[in-house]
Amino acid sequence: MRRVLHTGAPALLGIVLLLGTAAPAWAVYKVVGPDGSVTFTDVPPSSAHAAVVPDVAATPASELPRHLRELQRNAPVVIYTTPDCKACDAGVQLLRKRGIPYAEKTIVTPQDAQALKAMDPSMELPLLSVAGVQLSPGFNSGAWDQALSAAGYPRDSQLPGSYRFAIPQSLVPMQPGAPAPAAAPAPAPSRAAAPAQPPVVAPPDPNAPPGFKF
């Protein structure tokens, strides 16, 4: 189980493979963690080296067997993960082994962390939702299997051999072309008060009568 303790984007460590020279609007970043775990995200990693891979579309629902297509529509499965999380990887592997057509939402930005906190104040991952019902946070293979079976999903994979799972998506998608938040205008420089000037005194008039002062 991994707990998200901060709202900043986690450091994406490990080997980063550059598979493209430019990051198009649909760029997907592949990050290989220190333990060999692979994470795909559409949010640029903090590393100076950007790993861009082609966006491989998931197999459309229309190509699924009818019963899986109906299950995906009526009892959708969503897993919430974060990079460099072994429990998250184990949860994904369970879903793939059972042939569950799931959606994966990753927590990689401050906005993602805030949205996760609104969903589950414990902010513990992975988090699984089956048919709109969130299970207790953390990976629990027994509880996950029970919830999936109760929803009607088969125990063994019945996905076609050519099935492609969807790549992970950030929990709060960044809108393409969205302008950056405007910075607050800088305050006008304050002006220091001018130093007091001594009063101007007229020079004495030599022709003035004795005892007269200006």
Image: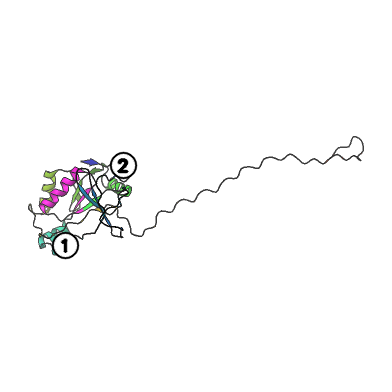
Q: Nearer the viewer, residue 207 or 113?
A: 207
Q: Quadrant of residue 211?
A: top right
Is residue 3 visible in the rendered image? The answer is yes
Residue 136 shows in this picture: no
Q: Is residue 84 magenta?
A: yes
What is the tally of numbered marks visible in this picture? 2
Residue lying furthest left in this view? 156
Task: Report the amino acid beneath label 2.
Answer: His
Secondary structure category for the residue under label 1: helix
Q: Quadrant of the C terminus?
A: top right
Tell me where residue 22 appears, x and y as whole percent.
31, 58
Element at label 2: loop
The residue carrying pointer 1 sits among few (fewer than 14), some (14 to 19) or many (20 or more) residues within 10 Å by Cα, namely some
Label 1 vs 2, first from the N-terminus: 2
Q: Position of residue 153 (x, y in %)?
A: 10, 54
Q: How is the image coloured?
A: rainbow
Residue 51 on image: x %, y % = 27, 53
Left or right: 155, with 175 as reference point: left
The part of the image, by quadrant, that contains residue 208 is: top right
Badges 1 and 2: C-beta atoms under 8 Å apart? no
Is 70 located above or below residue 123 in the figure?
Answer: below
The stretch of residues the image draws in magenta is: 77-103
| Nearer to the camera, 108 or 26 | 26
Three-letter amino acid code at disc 1?
Ala
Foreground residue among 135 and 18: 18
Residue 6 disc label:
2
For residue 61, the mark is 1
What percent of the width, then of the height, locates residue 26? 28, 59
Residue drawn 18% across the image and 46% down it = 89
